[in-house]
Amino acid sequence: MPHPVLGVPSDSHGNPAAITPDPPQALPELCAQVHQRLEAFLRAEPATERLRQVQEQSRLSLKVLEEALERYGLDELSLSYNGGKDCLVLLILYLSALHSHATKTPPTTTNPSHPPPPRLPQALQSVYIISPHPFREVDDFVNTSLRTYHLALARYAKPMKEAFAAYLADQPSVKAIFVGTRRTDPHGAALKYFDPTDRGWPPFMRIHPVIDWHYAEIWAFIRELGIPYCGLYDMGYTSLGGTTDTHPNPALKGDPGGGGVVEEGGYRPAYELVEDGEERLGRDW
């Protein structure tokens, strides 16, 4: 059974129960707890080849996050967060990287080669670009994330380009934004870990720590660490947009194995999908 990452109990199937942060942890304690759990996962002997791949992907992503924290101050960094599975994995990795960065041994006063590590803020800068037709379940999960993970979340119900322009106008210190895009996403094939925005877009550095993760690896990470996620994924949704363009994934309809448990509405949960190419079969484009 997975060990919960935030002290959240799991049911008999290993699925995390709902978060009830009472009282909520301060950000430094939260980062330390996430870091401890993630490090335990990375040190463990993987039970499957997929978990070994997830360990390797996690290490690579942590290196990207650490490089970002070396390049930019915390006031210059933000996180694009919409409650989806990919940015959720990114957020957990970011919390762990923040703990490592903030607890580095400071240089000696006689020979300082770097400035001392930063103190963590009370909340993390983040931006939520709201779908024109949002799911109530997504908004509810984002609100839960805001409280649990200490997100200073700015919300914009605008097209993406206009939303980022408005956000940067409101937060002029932000120079770089973490994005949970993966290689198999639309327009993700040619992206690098660090990519400036294209001409015509508001200027900032897009940082893609989970760009090379596969769909099944995202879910293996979430379930192995016991991370609570949006309930729509248990109803067969695999890629979350808005209510007018998102449906349960037809590849998860019914029980192909015979004798398995079919989730509410006749669809199996998102984590049972394996192929990257089937992730968006429930989206209208």
Image (cartoon, grey):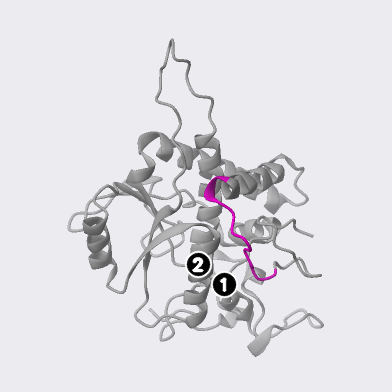
Q: Residue 263 is drawn in which quadrant?
A: bottom right
Q: Is residue 37 above or below residue 162?
A: above
Which residue is label 1 attached to? 230
List x then y, in percent, for residue 28: 55, 45
Element type at mark 1: loop
Three-letter residue code for mark 1: Cys
Residue extending farthest bottom = 265
User: Along the line of sight, which residue is nearer the eye, 197 or 29?
Assistant: 29
List x then y, in percent, for residue 42: 68, 42
- Which of the numbered marks, if any, corresponds to residue 140? none
Along the polypeptide, which appears first: circle 2 or circle 1?
A: 2
Q: Is residue 3 above or below residue 11?
A: above
Residue 181 in sight from this viewpoint? no
Reply yes or no: does residue 131 show up in magenta.
no
Q: Which residues are magenta?
A: 17-28
- At 49% across and 70% down in the image, what residue appears? 143
Mark 2 Cα-neighbour bin, 10 Å: few <14, some 14–19, many ≥20: many
Contact check, label 2 and label 1, Cβ < 8 Å? yes
Residue extending farthest front = 23
- At 77% across and 79% down in the image, what residue appears? 257
Tell me the quarter of the image containing the N terminus.
Answer: bottom right
List x then y, in percent, for residue 225: 68, 55
Three-letter residue code for mark 2: Gly
User: Along the line of sight, which residue is nearer the eye, 137 or 54?
Assistant: 137
Which residue is label 2 attached to? 84
Mark 1 Cα-neighbour bin, 10 Å: few <14, some 14–19, many ≥20: many
List x then y, in percent, for residue 36: 66, 43
User: Magenta residues: mostly which secondary structure?
Assistant: loop
Element type at mark 2: loop
- At 40% across and 25% down in the image, what residue appears? 115
User: Along the line of sight, which residue is nearer the eye, 227 or 251?
Assistant: 227
